[in-house]
Amino acid sequence: MSNMIAKSALTATLDLFSDTQPGLVWFWLVLCVFSLLLSRFRMGTRVYWPAAVYYALASLAQGIPLLATIFGFAAFPIVLFAAAGARLALIVASERACDTQLHRGWRIVSLVTVVLTVLAAIAAFALGSDSFVIAGVVVTILFALHSLSAAVFFGLAASSLPAARRLLAGAVPWALLWCAAAALGIATMLGFEATALVYGYLPLAVHAADGLMGLAVLTAVMLELAKPAPEDTALDDYTAKITESIERFIPNELMFHLEKADFFDLRLGDHIRKDMTIFFSDIRAFTELSEQLTPEESFAFVNSYLSRVVPIIRTHGGFIDKYMGDGIMALFADANGADQAVESA
């Protein structure tokens, strides 16, 4: 009787990878489609693609046993390959959600888990059905340790990363249930008995925890919606460049004195009457000097000159009204503008 219970418990552990839940297949597919739609909506944002791959592989892992019963092939090794791929996609999705700020130990532990799972799948494929139960227990232990490490690393990052806090909310029950499944497998292999209630419902609980983790990943990556889309950022960058170009010809200080909030408020004939000090300067004998220089050298010389004198004028409270070749016209609007202009000179 004890051997029958132990065998049933091991079989229940194997059900984690060989039992088909049609509802879960559709659940993962819906998450996959939703992620793809978000990626389409947020064009150029790459955070949703790893999540979509994660959901697609999780759906595949759930659906393979059903296909195996129809077409008559061994599902278990293929399920392990799909599960390993899903965990790999989970690594990338969680990293992207947290802007690659997670501790690199999470990547190391995750990659080791994926590699060992692939090796277990290869061994199960090569050795046949006699090795399925042992391989199932081994991979269950690997996934339990990986899930536990996820809770630890997400917890370490939760204080500074909102996405990590959302991942942690799903990782804690996820880790606990996978650890329970691993403990059941180890206990039965060591000869301890388990009740039918435990080994009958644990696979369903673990599948539910997987789904909860999938939702946690989705809510974490959706924090990206609070950021400007790449196309919006590109428009902002373009607007900033246009503004910078206009400011070369219409200084902000002039806008202030004209009492205009924006360049677009300017109208032909706008003016204001105000006492100001006007400052002129140019390079003595620049015409003769430029005749000895190539056009490139002349431009370089003028730019070098302006880069030195313009900051001095601004430091003394003036602003550039216009450039006239090698000459500068600056305005000083303060009451002591004359003194400021002389100090600038």
Image: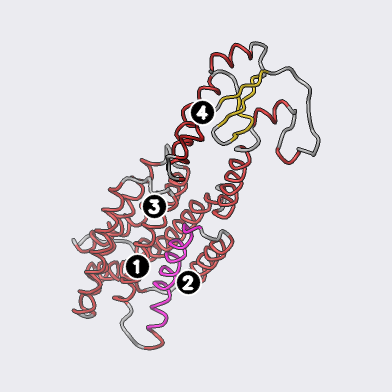
Q: Is residue 148 above or below residue 304?
A: below
Q: Earlier in the sequence, mark 3 or mark 4?
A: 3
Name the residue that disc number 4 marks.
283
Q: How many marks?
A: 4
Check residue 83 in the rendering and tell me which mark sits there, or answer none. 1
Mark 1 Cα-neighbour bin, 10 Å: few <14, some 14–19, many ≥20 = many
Q: What secondary structure is marked by label 1?
A: helix
Is the stretch drawn in magenta largely helix, strand or loop? helix
How busy is the neighbourhood of tag 4: few (under 14 within 10 Å), some, or many (20 plus)?
few
- State the SS at label 2: helix
Q: Quick one: 251 or 91, which is closer to the camera?
A: 251
At mark 3, the secondary structure is helix
Residue at x 46%, y 40% (from the top left corner) = 291
Q: Which mark is residue 336?
A: none
Q: Nearer the viewer, mark 1 or mark 4?
A: 4
How much space separates mark 3 and mark 2, taking CA atoms? 25 Å
Which of the two discs, 2 and 4, sits closer to the camera?
A: 4
Q: Which residue carries the number 2 mark?
A: 25
Q: Residues within 10 Å of mark 3 (few under 14, many from 20)?
A: many
User: Is 59 placed above or below 261 here?
Assistant: below
Q: Secondary structure at mark 4?
A: loop
Kind of residue at disc 2: Val
Q: Residues within 10 Å of mark 2 (few under 14, many from 20)?
A: some
Question: Which disc, if any, is residue 95?
Answer: 3
Distance Cα–Cα, label 1 vs label 2: 13 Å
Which contiguous range is marked in magenta? Answer: 45-68
For badge 4, the amino acid type reads Ile
